[in-house]
Amino acid sequence: MPSSVSYSVPLFSSFFSGEANPSSFSQPFKIGHNKNTSVILKTKKAPLLHVAAGRTSSANSIRKTQRQEDDDYHATLKALNSKGRFPRKSLGQHYMLNGSINEQLVQAADVKEGDVVLEIGPGTGSLTNVLVNAGATVLAIEKDPYMASLVTERFATTNRVKVLEEDFTRCHIRSHLSAVLDTRSSLDANLQKAKVVANIPFNISTDVVKQLLPMGDIISEVVLLLQEEAALRLVDPSLSSSDYRPINILITFYSDPEYKFKVPRTNFFPQPKVDAAVVAFRLKQAGEYPQVSSTKSFFSMVNSAFNGKRKMLRKSLQHICPSPQIEAALSEVGLPTTSRPEELSLEDFVRLHNLIHKP
């Protein structure tokens, strides 16, 4: 394959929705039509947008075990054109231009032959293709019926891809994933858990994390590509900052998060105004969770605390127990009686809960 290729069709290679607000799109390209009605992308400096299509050396190891042909950019673009698919600002859609990012995603999750992988929003299936090439069985959840149809058709000749046309935030993912695991476990007794590898829409990132992280009994690792700003907020928020929220308590309760690498905005079309990043969450087992008498009451307390974020805990939690009791518990934890929620770590919340919650 040449090091650079010019396309006269929309440059859609992989699905990534990283922008919840349509107004954040930049406009680096102009879209027009030639006499043959094919779409041509132009910049101010060049008649066509040139995209590097080279592969990194790390791709060689994946090719050795591949089950599908390497991603055919031309075929993918042609398929998208045939369905009339273009980036939808209402969904904040961005399409990946750099295929090596998908390979790095798969490597970040250490996907191996025989793994079961959940993919959210497969788009055109280029990440799906890398997962299949690595030997994984893929359960893909796709809300867009056009994309679901495209991926189903693309992998019709393999038994390694199952596509469900559903809204991930509303589907019974545990049931779907358990069914695939049960089927695969009958072939591989060592297979017990699945992995998640996905480029997800930013506007559902919190919902995805909330739904997946408590599933450590059937998922070992979750690797997501999302906006860098969101990645930093989820992985490494600072105490006493406006970015510190209940979701951060949930993340550290159920997983060990790690910021993997940055993905510059230039890898996407349309080019967003912000960069992206890849984050990995190693899911904890039940025995590794902080010891609380009830996870339901614990997170209820945390949410109540942050609902009155500017209030002192002795005020925002007084519906649980009287303020003097909360003050006494804070003192026993070693915190000021005037403490606010953004000043407490996960360990502080756990100790406070266990002191004021009566089973």
Image (spheres, rainbow, N blue to C red):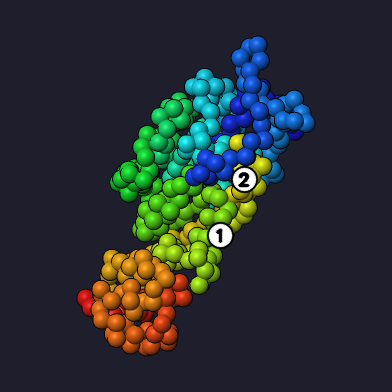
Left or right of residue 9, residue 124 in this image: left
Q: CA distance from mark 1 to mark 2?
A: 16 Å
Determine whether label 1 and label 2 are within 8 Å by CB.
Answer: no
Quadrant the C terminus occupies? bottom left
Left or right of residue 291, residue 43 in this image: right
Residue that label 1 marks: 232
- Estimate the x, y position of residue 168 in percent, counting from the top left: 38, 43
Q: Residue at x 46, y 75 (%)?
A: 343
Return the residue nearer the eye: 108 or 22. Answer: 22
Q: Residue furthest right?
A: 45
Residue that label 2 marks: 273
Quadrant the N terminus occupies? top right
Residue 85 at least partly seen: yes
Q: Residue furthest left?
A: 359
Residue 287 at least partly seen: no
Which label number is shown at residue 99? none
